[in-house]
Image (cartoon, rainbow, N blue to C red):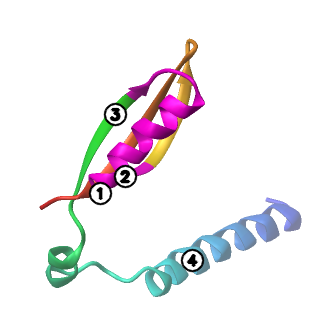
Amino acid sequence: MTKRSVGVAAVFLAGCAVGGASSQLMVPKASAEQAATLAKWEYVAVKLKGDDADVIAQANKLGGEAWEMCGSVLHHGSSYSWFKRARK
């Protein structure tokens, strides 16, 4: 092996060691107590139809039922939106 290959290997190994060690410090481990306090969600997907006023009315109706829009996509000319709310 050349000096350059040894140097590159040493830097690579040092980076792996530092990355692995720092990941243990940055991400706290989850506990059963934390899991019990996390919100549980239910989801619904809706194909929104009509003009802007109709879509807004549909979204406002869902919002009145405690649904919160969490995503939307346009697929083959149709608009689909996903809503979530905390489970009761």
Q: Quadrant of residue 13?
A: bottom right
Q: CA gap, disc 2 to disc 1? A: 5 Å
Quarter of the picture containing the N terminus is: bottom right
SS class of the residue under badge 2? helix
Q: Which mark is residue 66?
A: 1
**Where in the figure is residue 45, as x and y percent of width and height?**
34, 33
Circle 1: residue type = Ala
Circle 3: residue type = Ala
x 60%, y 80%: residue: 18
Q: CA gap, disc 4 to disc 1? A: 47 Å
Q: Are marks 4 and 1 in contact (CB under 8 Å)?
A: no
Q: Quadrant of residue 35?
A: bottom left
Q: CA gap, disc 4 to disc 2? A: 48 Å
x 29%, y 39%: residue: 44
**Where in the figure is residue 40, as x and y percent of width and height?**
20, 62
Part of the protein shown in magenta: 47-69
